[in-house]
């Protein structure tokens, strides 16, 4: 309920003589004229595109592949935990590969909800999720903008040339052949 | 078992005031009163200190093998006889408290031991927390952070132990094990089934099962709980969710009349797992597998989701708001037409006491001579005692044959309210003879339950309200079907086999279209506002004094289990 005593009426101030002659507009135009003669920094997008600093530009995500072309993510949920926008949804499963324990059976990022802060990239222990220099993201529906695992891997295939994966070494945990020596390294070990 | 548990049972005294004979000890210059006979470690934990330990568990025998809990103690000097700090460290889990004892944990020597022990525990550990389900509730993580080193000095290659499938429900990740032997002692002393053992020695030691004898007993899920690290993991919960996303709600298991205190871990309105809570004298630290994995029906899509009203041949979907009026009107009509003694309400032992009371009150308000029926009690086999094959008075855990949580609670209410009452079998028999014209039948059992004789009797009812979870012969024909929520969606209290009144909280929202039983019964009984167990218990206590006091499980110190 709005009470009468809560209402504050503000009257319009009287215009001065110069304001009535529209003089203050000229003051504004001064800035416009100054810029006409400066060096131009706008580009004619999309014909012309800016060069980005690919290392740290925060565009669309990608899910990296390991050396064998498999998704590098180990489904640890660190990114989902770190994400302030709660836009990552992972369903973990037992990995179909001998040498790895856990993998993302499903991995969805809602690119519309994402604020492109890069926290997920920061949190990932195996550098599996990265933001890419791709920014021209369009879609016709909201569903289309929820990127699933396949779509995120495609982004990797598309952008790997521009921004190659760092392939981090995580731990020094390597099989010693206690039972079967030829077993490949554990998840997270070496180049995953 | 030859080895005796000296841990003493309960963490927090039995409630009696025995401060006169409570020994006083001095821990880190602070005088602490403790229960007689408990180990110093237990006393320190109860006094709120976080002393690292792995092998000690208050429900198991003491082996003092992990050496993480060592402390300094004052002993008389052998020459002078003066009290002085002894040069060696003592395991606090194996040293019972004694009046006047002086010990300390806050010393460089003790901290050095903790640091070195932690380094040894992590020597061969794969450090695979990102893919380990225990991460977030792991004592290895907590203790490394608090008492260990921040980096590994190990330069040699680590021993790698493959994971082992040790039973139908449990996996063993041997490389994460700290060899505390809790799991082995559990299988020896509590379940009494002896499936687990330690093979090899030293850094090659590992936990294993005997060939052809997997870990498969009715209590095996507990080894996952007591394993302080991520070595034993539940296949059912494996990779499902990270534990820090789970929300915990305190509850009571509805699986049998033991009434184990449990914790419901849920995420986004889906129950992910159940864990036992410490509840001395009821389930202590344990729960059975049947209860632990028996919650799957909660998310069964076949559950009845919304009310169904049948008028003649027509089926309607009534609005929840109209239901109080409909039932009141129809019952009053039945009383008018068929007489005041032709009404009955079957109170299911799956109901909370509050719900049963609300329903009983309602029925008696429309028909003062209505018959209250103690509902169908599902029974399965015999009580199972553990350790397997022990005598009744030695049992550490009992799975009861009565597969419902609240038979006693319903009986208490029916007898306290007096008037006409009968047992379920008698009700079925009389119903078959056409003794009842209007009935309210509550089910809510996870398994099919309607007896054949009951199915036959349904034709005799002129008006029936059936409150159930799954479609069955009763819900097919009932005049009004009301969905029953699973216990995780409700709140109230259950009375266990021993008469303990134990409250449980609601964990998740009822599925869309449904409403909490308590709430609609509250509305139907003519109250307004929000149903809470506490509110109804207050009303009940005015008539049944027993409900004035409820038994809640005690809180436990951090890192207790
Ligand atoms: S960039 Fe930020 S908001 Fe977007 S998915 Fe990553 S953590 Fe979430
Ligand atoms: S943090 Fe990295 S490894 Fe972990 S779930 Fe996210 S993308 Fe996968
Ligand atoms: S498996 Fe777990 S409970 Fe068993 S000895 Fe190893 S760490 Fe202890
Ligand atoms: S030695 Fe005391 S807890 Fe292990």
Image (cartoon, rainbow, N blue to C red):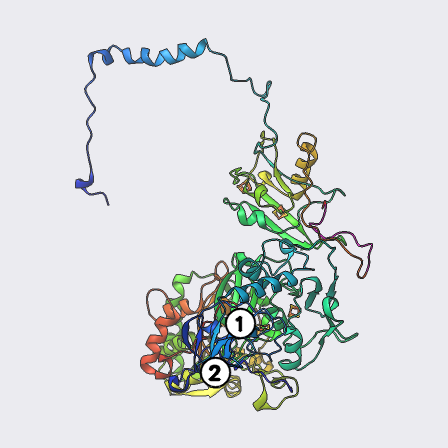
Query: On the rendered image, what quadrant is the C terminus of chain B found in?
Result: bottom right
- The disc placed on residue B553 is none
What is the chain identity of the residue bearing mark 2?
A: B
Decide: few, some or many residues near mark 2? Use Cα within 10 Å; few <14, some 14-19, many ≥20: some
Measured along the vertical axis of the image, is residue B35 above or below residue A50?
below
Could you tell me which residue is drawn at 65 percent across and 84 percent down?
B388
State the image coordinates of residue B356 (x, y, percent, origin top left). Answer: 43, 77
The residue positioned farthest toward the front in the image shown: B79
Front position in the image: A165 or B109: B109
Q: Can residue B505 be seen in this view?
A: yes
State the image coordinates of residue B270 (x, y, percent, origin top left). Answer: 54, 60
Q: Report how many numbered discs are placed on residues in the image.
A: 2
> Which stretch appears magenta?
A180-190
- The disc placed on residue B98 is 2
Q: Is residue B465 visible?
A: no
Decide: few, some or many residues near mark 1? Use Cα within 10 Å; few <14, some 14-19, many ≥20: many
Of the four image quadrants, the one with ligand 1 is top right
Q: Name the residue under label 1.
A: B71
What is the chain identity of the residue bearing mark 1?
A: B
SS for dot 1: strand
């Amino acid at each position: 309920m709005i009470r009468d005593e809560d209402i504050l009426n503000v009257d319009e101030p009287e215009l001065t003589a110069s304001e009535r002659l529209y003089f203050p507009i000229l003051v504004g135009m001064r800035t416009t004229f100054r810029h006409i003669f400066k060096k131009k920094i706008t580009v004619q997008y999309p014909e012309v595109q800016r060069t980005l600093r690919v290392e740290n530009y925060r565009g669309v995500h990608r899910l990296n592949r390991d050396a064998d072309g498999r998704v590098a993510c180990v489904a640890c949920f660190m990114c989902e935990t770190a994400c302030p926008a709660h836009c990552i949804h992972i369903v973990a499963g037992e990995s179909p590969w001998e040498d790895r324990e856990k993998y993302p059976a499903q991995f969805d990022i809602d690119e519309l909800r994402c604020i492109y802060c890069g926290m997920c990239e920061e949190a990932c222990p195996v550098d599996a999720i990265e933001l890419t220099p791709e920014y021209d993201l369009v879609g016709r529906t909201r569903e289309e903008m929820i990127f699933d695992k396949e779509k995120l891997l495609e982004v990797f295939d598309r952008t790997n040339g521009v921004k190659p994966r760092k392939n981090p070494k995580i731990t020094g945990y390597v099989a010693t052949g206690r039972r079967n020596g030829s077993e490949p390294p554990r998840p997270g070990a070496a180049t995953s | 078992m030859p080895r005796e548990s000296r841990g003493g049972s309960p963490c927090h005294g039995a409630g009696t005031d025995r401060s006169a004979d409570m020994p006083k000890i001095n821990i880190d210059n602070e005088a602490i009163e403790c229960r007689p006979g408990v180990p110093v470690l237990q006393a320190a934990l109860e006094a709120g200190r976080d002393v690292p330990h792995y092998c000690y568990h208050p429900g198991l025998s003491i082996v003092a093998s992990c050496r993480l809990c060592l402390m300094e103690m004052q002993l008389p000097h052998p020459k002078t006889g003066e009290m002085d700090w002894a040069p060696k460290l003592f395991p606090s889990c194996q040293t019972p408290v004694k009046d006047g004892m002086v010990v300390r944990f806050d010393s460089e020597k003790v901290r050095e031991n903790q640091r070195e022990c932690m380094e040894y525990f992590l020597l061969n550990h794969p450090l695979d927390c990102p893919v380990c389900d225990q991460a977030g509730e792991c004592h290895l993580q907590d203790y490394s952070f608090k008492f260990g080193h921040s980096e590994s000095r190990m330069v040699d290659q680590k021993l790698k132990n493959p994971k082992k499938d040790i039973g139908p429900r449990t996996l063993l990740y041997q490389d994460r094990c700290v060899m505390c032997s809790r799991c082995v002692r559990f299988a020896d002393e509590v379940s009494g089934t002896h499936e687990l053992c330690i093979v090899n020695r030293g850094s090659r030691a590992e936990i294993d099962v005997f060939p052809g004898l997997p870990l498969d007993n009715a209590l095996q899920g507990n080894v996952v709980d007591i394993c302080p690290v991520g070595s034993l993991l539940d296949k059912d919960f494996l990779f499902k969710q990270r534990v820090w996303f789970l929300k915990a709600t305190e509850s009571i298991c509805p699986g049998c009349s033991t009434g184990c205190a449990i914790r419901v871990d849920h995420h986004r309105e889906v129950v992910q797992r159940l864990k036992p809570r410490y509840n001395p004298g009821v389930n202590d630290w344990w729960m059975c597998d049947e209860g632990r994995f028996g919650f799957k029906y909660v998310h069964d899509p076949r559950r009845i989701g919304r009310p169904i009203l049948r008028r003649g041949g027509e089926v309607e979907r009534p609005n929840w708001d109209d239901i109080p009026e409909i039932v009141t009107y129809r019952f009053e009509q039945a009383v008018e037409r068929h007489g005041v003694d032709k009404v009955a309400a079957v109170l299911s032992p799956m109901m909370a006491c509050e719900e049963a009371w609300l329903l009983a009150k309602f029925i008696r308000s429309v028909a003062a001579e209505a018959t209250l029926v103690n509902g169908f009690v599902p029974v399965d086999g015999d009580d199972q005692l553990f350790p397997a094959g022990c005598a009744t008075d030695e049992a550490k855990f009992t799975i009861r044959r009565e597969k419902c949580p609240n038979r006693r609670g319903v009986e208490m209410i029916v007898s306290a309210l007096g008037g006409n009452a009968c047992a379920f079998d008698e009700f079925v028999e009389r119903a078959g003879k056409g003794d009842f014209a209007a009935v309210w039948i509550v089910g809510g059992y996870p398994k099919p339950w309607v007896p054949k004789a009951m199915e036959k009797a349904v034709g005799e009812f002129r008006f029936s309200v059936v409150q159930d979870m799954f479609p069955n012969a009763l819900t097919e024909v009932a005049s009004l079907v009301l969905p029953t929520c699973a216990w995780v969606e409700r709140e109230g209290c259950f009375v266990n086999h021993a008469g303990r009144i134990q409250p449980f909280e609601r964990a998740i929202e009822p599925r869309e279209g449904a409403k909490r039983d308590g709430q609609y019964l509250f509305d139907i009984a003519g109250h307004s506002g929000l149903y809470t167990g506490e509110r109804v218990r207050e009303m009940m206590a005015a008539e049944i004094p027993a409900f004035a006091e409820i038994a809640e499980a005690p809180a436990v110190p951090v890192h207790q289990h």
